[in-house]
Image (cartoon, rainbow, N blue to C red):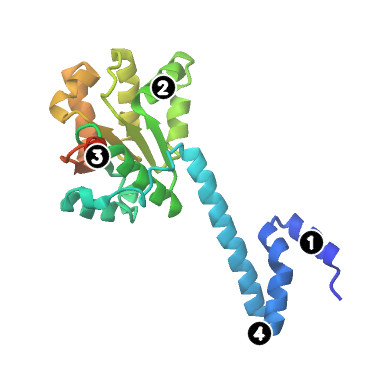
Amino acid sequence: MVNNQLLISYLKELHVPTIRECYEDIARTAEQELLSYERYLLELAEKECEARRERRIDRLLRESRLPLEKNIDSFDLKRIPAKVRQQVTTLLDGSFLDRKENVLAFGNPGTGKTHLLCAVGQELIRSGRRVYFTSCSLLVQNLLIAKQDLKLSRMIKRLSKHDAIIIDDIGYVQQSREEMEVLFTLLAERYERGSIMITSNLPFSKWETIFKDPMTTAAAIDRLVHHSVILELNIKSYRMEKAQNAQ
């Protein structure tokens, strides 16, 4: 006769909560279906691994700060050009992260750039990748504070743990030269070391208004474009289209 209390204490010590919760139910099923000991053990191991994967994904989603409502199921892929749909399908396998490629999404306001990159980001997390989402304005504020506190390198090192950083709306709010310098520092440090995913309403020809200096602008664009996938969402505003349909 198995001492259940002793078994439970061992399972607690081994940190296998899912096995602790379901071993009795699976044991009864194993008896009814005449499963081998190995098959019973396999069932328990599968349950524990599946639960651990789900907990890890939940944790990565929380840490990512992604808006979870902007997912692939709520994005209308039929609205975007066929070329972009094909690019998105390729991005979802995550191999661009291994190549340290960037993803740059351009288009007018309301075309779904943020939603699309957030949806891709969530799918990457579900495949085990680490993704971090931030608006450009919040990112540069935090980088500038870190620089003032002499902790910029520490913050950049912490961000380097993510496979991809999604920077939303670069150029949407005009930043000071000092703020753009710390953003450039991040881009330079991350070059060929980790992927950056950016949304912007501004084409490259207007990026001098972001970085304030022709040389810095050229250097930033060069680092981003060198290994990159460019998504051009030259479509009608989804919000405007929705408002017109409502009327």
Q: Which residue is disc 2 drawn over?
A: 143
Kind of residue sitting beneath label 2: Leu
Secondary-structure class at tag 3: helix
Q: What is the spatial separation of the Cα atoms under label 3 and label 1, in whole angstroms?
A: 54 Å
Query: Mark 4 — residue?
Result: 33
Relative placement, left or right, of 108 versus 179 is: left
In-image side of 142 versus 52 (left or right): left
User: Between marks 4 and 1, how big is the CA–CA gap?
Assistant: 24 Å
Tag of residue 8: 1
Q: Tell me, yes or no, if residue 96 can be seen here.
A: yes
- The amino acid on which the numbered mark 4 sits, given as a three-letter code, is Glu
Q: Which of 4/79 is in front?
A: 79
Secondary structure beneath dot 4 equals: loop
Earlier in the chain: of badge 2 and badge 1, it is 1
Q: Quadrant of the C terminus?
A: top left
Residue under label 3 = 238
Furthest toward the front, the residue is 247
Which residue is at the far left?
205
